[in-house]
Image (cartoon, rainbow, N blue to C red):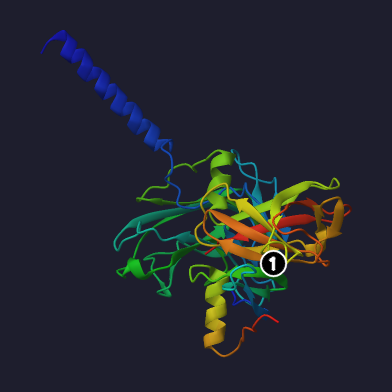
């Protein structure tokens, strides 16, 4: 499968406890919430693109 | 030998013969390593033009149109119809098989599928297997085959190459692909179903599992909740997040229990936030956002946000399908 087109990646935090919960991003045109699990294919691809310098994950505003 | 012992021996022989005959006829279960090989489960929809996952567990590439159709060989309800690939990059349908330690070097696997075309052309490479994670081809033999306008079953046996399968994340397999020696044109149409990979050197008849079994196998990787077209369908209940009602009074936590344990924590996608409606204390409001809460392979917290901050902390809330929403669904993706 071709690599995913990922834009608007942003961390989301647990509203009660404040720790990072997931990354919200638009992946291949679809808004998604991605868990911070290396076994998850979307998270693995995000890590790959961040390592390659082609994607930056924004902090929540 | 007493007559009784003789009769028991005869009965055992007969039973073994029956078991062998049943095996030869393909009656033994759970031998197909492919999930949804008969293209019966399509949780995401039944027609696609974009690349990526289409029928459950299968991906399609090269901007082809792939759709569920009832043109199928005897014994099958559906096939996948493929047309209009871009003619530039190689076309393929593939399935990634989860690696649970079941593969080893020297293992014989037999790969089979039913295919037909709108005209005769060559396809390949049935039998190609690719080890993701290692990123190497691991099949010893592949098969280019002549597609005809009649449904035909093709099969090839291959031997897995000598690599460390513990390092493989998944095994990629292809029922159809226009790799080497293909003469498939971008204007050609093909149909495929009955994809099977089994241990051994013999192609046994396709293993038909019940729809419930096949759906459950698919839901380990993808689970989609679709809410039907009538108004205000109940989606889930939850509670207002926050401490003593002083914070996050626009946020609702809902809990989704999966029907089967998923492969990993899942990515959430959904129709659109405004296709959901939040109801609490007789005040209805359209959801303005959806995001993932705590996730595990067994369950998932989904957070719905609404524009105003007038919810009471800790109180029960209902999430419904928005009236007149064109579609309303939420999906959990743990695909490979």
Left or right: where does residue B212 sit relative to residue B173?
right
Q: Give coordinates of residue B117: x percent, y percent.
A: 65, 56
Is residue B67 positioned above or below A30 on the image?
Answer: above
For the residue pair B312 and B201, the one nearer the viewer reads as B312
Point out residue B221 in the picture as x, y percentages from the top left corner: 55, 57
Give neighbour class at mark 1: few <14, some 14-19, many 20+ (Cα, 10 Å). many
Q: Residue at x 62, y 83 (%)?
A: A57
Q: Quadrant of residue B135?
A: bottom left
Q: Is B212 located above or below residue B144 in the figure?
A: above
B82 above or below B228?
below
Seen from the viewer's position, the closer of residues B47 and B266 is B266
Foreground pick, B176 / B272: B272
Q: Position of residue B115 (x, y in %)?
A: 59, 53
Q: What is the chain letter for disc 1?
A: B
Determine whether, in the image, residue B251 is placed left or right of residue B106: right
Residue occupying the point 65% across, 84% down: A58
Local secondary structure at mark 1: loop
Judge by depth and name the residue closer to the eye, B278 or B21.
B278
- In the displayed image of the protein, which residue is found farthest to the left? B1
Quadrant in which the N terminus of chain B is drawn: top left
Res. B13 image quadrant: top left
In the image, what residue occupies the spot 58% across and 71% down?
A42
Residue drawn at (22%, 13%), measured in percent from left and top?
B7
Q: Is residue B276 visible?
A: yes
- Report whether residue B148 is seen: no
Q: Point out the residue furthest to the bottom here.
A: A53
Q: Which residue is mark 1?
A: B64
Q: Quadrant of residue B333?
A: bottom right
């Amino acid at each position: 499968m071709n690599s995913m087109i990922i834009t608007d990646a942003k961390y989301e935090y647990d509203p009660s406890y404040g720790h990072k919960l997931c990354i919200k991003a638009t992946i291949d045109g679809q808004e998604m919430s991605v868990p911070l699990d290396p076994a998850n294919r979307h998270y693995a691809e995000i890590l790959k693109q961040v390592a390659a310098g082609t994607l930056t994950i924004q902090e929540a505003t | 030998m007493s007559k009784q012992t003789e009769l028991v021996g005869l009965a055992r022989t007969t039973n073994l013969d029956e078991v062998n005959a049943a095996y030869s006829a393909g009656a033994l279960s759970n031998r197909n390593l492919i999930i949804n090989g008969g293209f019966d489960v399509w949780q995401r929809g039944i027609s696609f033009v974009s690349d990526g996952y289409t029928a459950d567990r299968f991906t399609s590439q090269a901007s082809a149109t792939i759709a569920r159709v009832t043109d199928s060989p005897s014994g099958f309800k559906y096939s996948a119809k493929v047309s209009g690939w871009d003619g530039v990059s190689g076309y393929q349908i593939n399935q990634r098989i989860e690696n649970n330690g079941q593969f080893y070097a020297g293992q014989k696997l037999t790969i089979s599928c039913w295919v037909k075309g709108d005209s005769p052309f060559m396809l390949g490479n049935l039998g190609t297997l690719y080890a993701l994670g290692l990123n190497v081809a691991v099949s010893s033999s592949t098969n280019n085959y002549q597609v005809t306008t009649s449904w035909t079953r093709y099969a090839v046996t291959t031997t897995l190459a000598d690599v460390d399968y513990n390092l493989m994340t998944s095994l990629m397999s292809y029922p159809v692909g226009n790799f080497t020696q293909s003469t498939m044109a971008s204007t050609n149409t093909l149909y495929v179903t009955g994809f099977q990979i089994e241990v051994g050197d013999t192609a046994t008849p396709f293993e038909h599992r019940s729809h419930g079994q096949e759906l459950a196998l698919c839901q380990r990787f993808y689970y989609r909740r679709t809410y039907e077209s009538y108004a205000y369908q109940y989606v889930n209940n939850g509670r207002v997040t926050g401490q003593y009602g002083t914070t996050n009074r626009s946020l609702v936590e809902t809990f989704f229990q999966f029907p089967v344990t998923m492969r990993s924590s899942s990515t959430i996608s959904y129709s659109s936030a405004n296709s959901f409606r939040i109801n609490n204390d007789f005040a209805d409001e359209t959801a303005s956002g959806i995001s993932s809460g705590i996730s595990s392979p067994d369950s998932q917290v989904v957070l719905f946000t609404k524009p105003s901050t007038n919810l009471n902390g800790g109180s029960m809330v209902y999430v419904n399908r928005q009236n007149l929403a064109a579609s309303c669904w939420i999906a959990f993706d743990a695909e490979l």
